[in-house]
Image: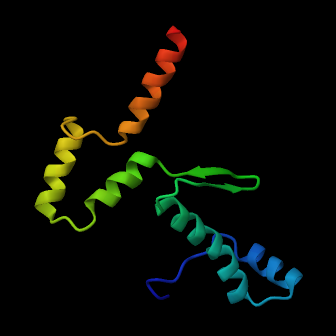
Amino acid sequence: MATNERIFCNISVLKEVAGELGLTLEQTKKIIESQSEYTAIVMASDTYDSIRWPYLGVFKSKPKEVQMINHLRGMTPEQQKEFKIAVRTRKIKLNHWEDKLKEDKKNDKLQ
């Protein structure tokens, strides 16, 4: 087996679906994999969109995680380490807009 080849848990289900749809096993595998790949792409993007898989649930990206990943791109390993420490110690604040929203809600309640 090749190192990048994925193992499907239930090959009999895959064969049954391929037979019902009149597709080859390879085509059916690609269809199944495309949903996971699309989910990964959307979650890694800056849009913060969620993906709903029927009968399974909703996948959401964490805005702070995406923002952190975007900040780390192009940094040297030393810069990345310093940046992560600064975020952990709150010298650098990610998503200051979240704090603004919380403050606005708090002010609305007080009025």
Q: Please tell me in which quadrant of the rendered image residue 30 appears.
A: bottom right
In the displayed image of the protein, which residue is found farthest to the right? Answer: 20
Up the image or down, 78 lies above or below 27; here it is above
Is residue 23 found left or right of 20 in the rendered image? left
Looking at this view, name the residue that lies furthest to the front.
111
User: Which scheme is used to colour this image of the protein?
Assistant: rainbow
Left or right of 18, for residue 111: left
Residue 53 screen position, x and y as percent: 70, 57
Q: Nearer the viewer, residue 106 or 17?
A: 106
Q: Position of residue 41 (x, y in %)?
A: 52, 68
Callout count: 0
**Rendered view: 59 above or below 95:** below
Check the image and name the residue furthest to the top: 110
In the depicted structure, whether residue 96 falls above or below residue 28: above
Q: Is residue 64 above or below residue 1?
A: above
Residue at 18%, 37% (x, y): give it.
Answer: 91
Residue 10 horizontal side relative to residue 4, left or right: right
Q: Position of residue 2 (x, y in %)?
A: 47, 88
Question: Which residue shows up at 37% across the image and 41% down it?
Answer: 95
Measuring 52% from the left and 53% from the top, which residue is drawn there?
48
**Front-most of 26 and 46?**
46
Q: Position of residue 43 (x, y in %)?
A: 51, 59
